Amino acid sequence: MTIQFLTNAETIQAHQLQGFFVGWPNPPSPETHLRLLRQSDEVVLALDQETGQVVGFVTALTDRVLSAHIPLLEVLPAYQGRGIGRELMRRMFQRLQGLYMVDLACDPALVPFYESLGMQRATAMILRRYEHQAGSVTPSARA
């Protein structure tokens, strides 16, 4: 297996984004997934060169001045445990290295993974609108 890491999704097609969002009741479609990758401020993708399948990704939203938020890191279940998630995060941290704060919220079971990357525990607040989980509603554009 040869993994190639990409820092944009311009050459990626929706059919290469199968199998993500495991366990989500209303997962985004591959087309919506592609839109979210292309519209993120920063992205790192892991591509299996043998199959052409995207096997992992991480996204970041940033003001490019002080802060960034990492909303999504996923590796396909068949590829987990091979260091791909760790490498995606390492590369994302490189892309965000000049910023004061890089934040994310995660499930308790994932805290040790992020601590092993040098992140610290913190209290976070979240709002989840599961009826919009598939990404079908577009927020109003600002005037």
Image (cartoon, rainbow, N blue to C red):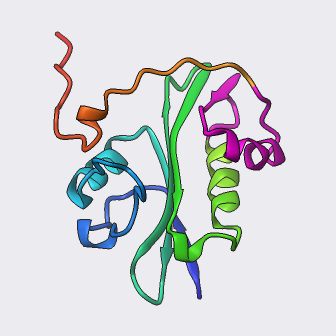
Give the residues in magenta: 96-121
Q: Position of residue 70 (x, y in %)?
A: 55, 37
Residue nearest the observer in this picture, 42 or 110:
110
Above or below, 100 against 16 in this view is: above
Q: Is residue 35 above or below residue 46?
A: above
- Choose top left, top right, bottom left or bottom right for residue 11: bottom left
Locate the N terminus and report the quarter of the image it occupies: bottom right
Q: Is residue 55 left or right of residue 2?
A: left
Q: Nearer the viewer, residue 70 or 27?
A: 27
* Residue at 26% from the left image edge and 60% from the top image edge: 30
Task: Kindly identify the residue that appears in the image at 83 percent across and 48 percent down.
Answer: 116
Image location (x, y in percent) of residue 25: 32, 48
Q: Residue at x 68, y 19 (%)?
A: 123
Q: Is residue 110 magenta?
A: yes
Picture quarter with the C terminus:
top left
The image shows residue 6, relative to residue 111, as above or below, that is below
Residue 85 relative to residue 76: left or right: right
- Label count reads 0
Question: How far across and down, in percent of the image, does residue 97 sit?
Answer: 70, 37
Say left or right for 110 vs 115. left
Residue found 62% across the figure and 48% down from its top: 92
The picture quadrant where one finds residue 114 is top right
**x and y, in percent, of residue 81 in the image:** 69, 71
Q: Residue furthest top?
A: 143
Residue 136 among magenta residues: no
Q: Quadrant of residue 36?
A: top left
